[in-house]
Amino acid sequence: MNSPQFTAEPSNDTVEHGITVGDVPGLRSPASDAGRAPLNFDVIIAGCGPTGAVLGAELRLHDVRVLVLEKETEPVSFVRVVGLHIRSLELLAMRGLLDRVLEHGRQRPAGGFFAAISKPAPKDLDSAHAYLLGIPQPVIVHLLEDHAIQLGAQIRRGCAVAGFEQDDEGVTVELADGEQLRSRYLVGCDGGRSTVRELLGVGFPGEPSRTETLMGEMEVGVPQEEIAAKVTEIRETHKRLWLRPFGEGVYSVVVPAAGVSDRAEPPTLEDFRQQLRTIAGTDFGVHSPRWLSRFGDATRLAERYRVGRVLLAGDAAHIHPPTGGQGLNLGVQDAFNLGWKLAAQIRGWAPETLLDTYQTERHPVAEDVLDNTRAQMELHSTEPGPQAVRRLLTELMDFDEVNRYLIEKITAIGIRYDFGEGPDLLGRRLRDIDVEQGRLYGLLHRGRGLLLDRTERLTAGGWSDRVDHLADPTAELDVPCVLLRPDGHVAWVGDDQQDLDDHLSRWFGEPATG
Ligand SMILES: Cc1cc2nc3c(=O)[nH]c(=O)nc-3n(C[C@H](O)[C@H](O)[C@H](O)COP(=O)(O)OP(=O)(O)OC[C@H]3O[C@@H](n4cnc5c(N)ncnc54)[C@H](O)[C@@H]3O)c2cc1C
């Protein structure tokens, strides 16, 4: 076994709720623990995709010692443009990152993403960031990774997690080259084929791919107008075919594959030509590919998001077809949900069940996304039945309420976590409203809780190390006071100090004093 490369000592001030071997299947017995290496890190994250990078940054906001292990030596080179939806843009704004990200993307209208049914979004969507941002995936990953590094996360490339073993105190993580590292927790953000999930033995039920799609960037041999006209005609029936100009004569080409193949084999240019000819009647003279890939429509959801000290997030926990552009958004939002809870566990102030609320809140959200992508895939079918349903839904979307419901679903601003009985705002995210100091999200950059108090008589005194208090009678709110969690969800609404104290304890643990 190689010595760990990082030798930071565990900080003395980190305390946490104990996890006992008896609680968790598959944990190593303490009898075999003699001579264990020190806990060099609080959290090791497997995978530095968008989910791992955001989680690393969120943990660093709370001084958690984080190591992100990424198996690839270099960032991915192929340029897939992804769409960041409203809730992800809001979360970036909440951490002061949005302006930087906006510089690198292209803003587009928020509507038209559900099954690519072209309907404009309602004008009064409840968000200060009511648009979609198209941005190349490698660029957003680079920006998120950079942010995590600036906050102090350590990232090691060329390090694949190959094994791990958990015990009462932590997790021993083994890399592909045999090196061993120890941390209190391990989070698998290692994508759809997650090694962590497999080693954990967590089931990943769902459906295998039934269709595959070829995707790549290449040059074309016919004029732009001719391509545009042909694509418009073909897309009347074949919603899964696209040719989009990418600049400098290069096109992004998306075309259904002939069948489901061995995904280890990359497609060839000839595969693209054949499929374009079969579906469009022409191969548009495609040549000189930059990169070629394929993706399927497998739809699967991990049975559990946590086993003891090991957790799953992002594609490691759920996969589904990219229709509607939700996968990256879902993973990033998992990370915002998990980060402060795991940090609280490590800092020692987490209430007993806080970490488990990661699964109870996020698993149903993923279930819902999987279902809406299943529905969208049906609506993309060229069969007469689904095409008729598509026409009917297109008509129904002329009703504002239907259109709004679907957009709020795709953009994730409609999510309401189940925090029990209470006003409609409880469990929802609060949009970026005007406050005395400027904008609400500007007050959430440090990832702490926030009491937004129009009564000017409440206090979060005993929790001031975890929760900020803004007494602001002018806040653009129609309730007396709200308690916001670090992820911007409303944890309490009211005006009674005792009730507030109970909810502060529920989400932020015992007060520091008295
Ligand atoms: C064609 C297409 C279009 C898409 N468009 C959109 C879109 O518009 N909007 C959207 O939200 N989503 C979109 N997605 C989905 C999105 O790309 C994924 O959901 C997203 O990349 C998931 O992020 P992740 O960090 O969870 O996993 P990944 O991005 O897969 O990152 C996992 C990382 O872990 C690393 N890794 C793997 N194994 C190990 C290991 N053993 N040890 C260490 N590291 C490891 C990998 O190298 C990788 O860097 C699209 C997907 C496809 C295929």
Image (tube, rainbow, N blue to C red):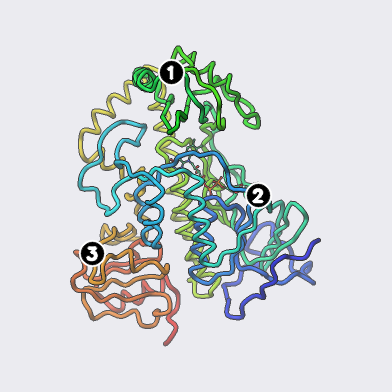
On the image, the x and y values in percent for residue 508 come to 43, 72
Lower sequence index among marks 2 and 1? 2
Task: Identify the residue position indicated by label 3 in the image.
Answer: 434
In which quadrant of the rendered view does residue 390 lie?
A: top left
Q: Are marks 2 and 1 in contact (CB under 8 Å)?
A: no
Question: Which amino acid type is shown beneath numbered disc 3?
Answer: Asp
Point 35% across, 60% down: residue: 420
**In terms of depth relative to the viewer, which is nearer, 442 or 43?**
442
Is residue 449 shown above or below 266?
below
Tell me how far mark 3 sits from mark 2, CA to CA. 44 Å
Q: Quadrant of the N terminus?
A: bottom right
Tell me how far mark 1 sits from mark 3, CA to CA. 51 Å
Seen in the image, is 476 located left or right of residue 412?
left
Task: Identify the residue position indicated by label 2 in the image.
Answer: 73
On the image, the x and y values in percent for residue 133 come to 37, 45
Q: Element at badge 1?
A: loop
Q: Ligand 1 sits in which quadrant? A: top right
Q: Is residue 27 visible?
A: yes
Task: Identify the residue position indicated by label 1 in the image.
Answer: 222
Q: Nearer the viewer, mark 2 or mark 1?
A: 1
On the image, the x and y values in percent for residue 182 come to 69, 65
Point 26% across, 57% down: residue: 424
Seen in the image, is 84 located left or right of residue 302?
left
Is residue 264 shown above or below 142?
above
Q: Is residue 201 visible?
A: no
